[in-house]
Amino acid sequence: MSVKYKDYYKLLGVSRTAEKEEISKAFKKLARKYHPDLNPDNADAEQKFKEINEAYEVLKDPEKRKMYDQFGSDWEHGQNFRPPPGYENAHFGGFGGAGGGDFSDFFETIFGGGGGFSGASFGGASGFGGQGFGGQSFGGAGFQQRPRKGTDSETTLQLTLEEAYKGGSKSITVQERATGPGGHPMVQSKTLDVNIPAGIKDGQKIRLAGQGSPGPNDGPRGDLYLKIRLAPHQYFKVEDNNVILDLDLTPWEAALGTRVKLPTLEGMIEMNIPAGIGSGKKLRVKGRGMGSGARKGDQFVRIMIQVPKGDSEEMTRLWQEMAAKSDFNPRPF
């Protein structure tokens, strides 16, 4: 019987003096590259994957490697050879699965026909009869991929100014990646109860531990970060930790003073407006701003004097009378 010599060291890209750890490392790298699940409908990759599995079956085992090395360097150039007498009857059986035919004639001749090709699958999909590529046995190699933490995710959470000011529990729905039937990736919704810290500001983030992407090989999930965005408000604007409210007054209210009802983030209040106040002046309502503790801001009420149109003869006459009797000059020049 004459079969063609196969250089297992060359197939794995290692020297004949390579240590077991170097051989294992080389095999894992090639196995990831040529695994059939990563190269569907690629006959060349499938054949290469079979060959490196065959090479590793021999070189990982000290007895098989010693037996293989006894062929000598005369076969390194790939010519045909006839194995020494008795090699045909040497059986090492059970090389990772039943049913031969996936190892080469060279392997069967030297080590007997008791073995079968033990492949692997990637990401839970069926492969060549082995177990999961991610952290499972790999062609008899004992290849284990450690569980790893999933990636962190970030999404935007929009809040009303009142929600951000008061804080409290809020139910939200987010989208996350998942594995569907047949191992295919999919997106699904999940509902989470989130505790909103009182006084949280635009741009701040809330961390939800363990709510991010799933970890490879049953590793822990990453974290989910909620980036706060404050929705525009009908009345208020936010400047740093302070809340600004523009309060419109008539000229006579500003001149004579008045008492008005106005909104805050905790509800309506009444405020005294001093007589003679000018447009643009600010009045403070202490402790009604954003933030918390010592950094809690205030609400400022900014006076905006609105002048009515002189759309009647009587109104025009009154404005003219006021102008004639007043010596007030608001300009310093």
Image (spheres, rainbow, N blue to C red):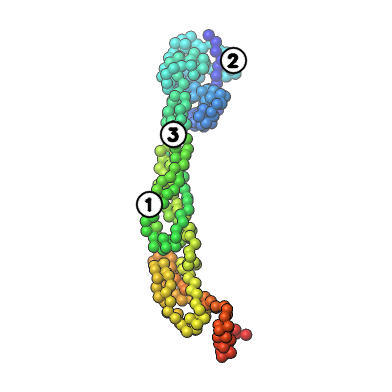
Point out which mark residue 303 bears.
none
Q: Is residue 325 above or below residue 24?
A: below
Point 40% across, 75% down: residue: 270
Q: Which residue is mark 1?
A: 193
- Return the disc, 3 or 1, that comes first in the chain's sequence: 3
Q: Amino acid at mark 2?
A: Gln
- Return the disc, 2 or 3, that comes first in the chain's sequence: 2
Distance between mark 1 and mark 2 Cα atoms: 70 Å
> Do the numbered discs 2 and 3 sit on residues whose CB atoms are within 8 Å?
no
Q: Amino acid at mark 1?
A: Asp
Q: Amino acid at mark 3?
A: Pro
Residue 143: horizontal and vertical position, in percent? 44, 31
- Return the disc, 1 or 2, that comes first in the chain's sequence: 2
Distance between mark 3 and mark 1 Cα atoms: 28 Å
Q: Helix or strand or loop: what does disc 1 sit on?
A: strand
Q: Helix or strand or loop: what does disc 2 sit on?
A: loop
Point 40% across, 42% down: residue: 220
Q: Nearer the viewer, residue 160 or 299?
A: 160
Residue 288: horizontal and vertical position, in percent? 41, 69
Point 41% across, 51% down: residue: 172
Q: Nearer the viewer, residue 135 or 331?
A: 331
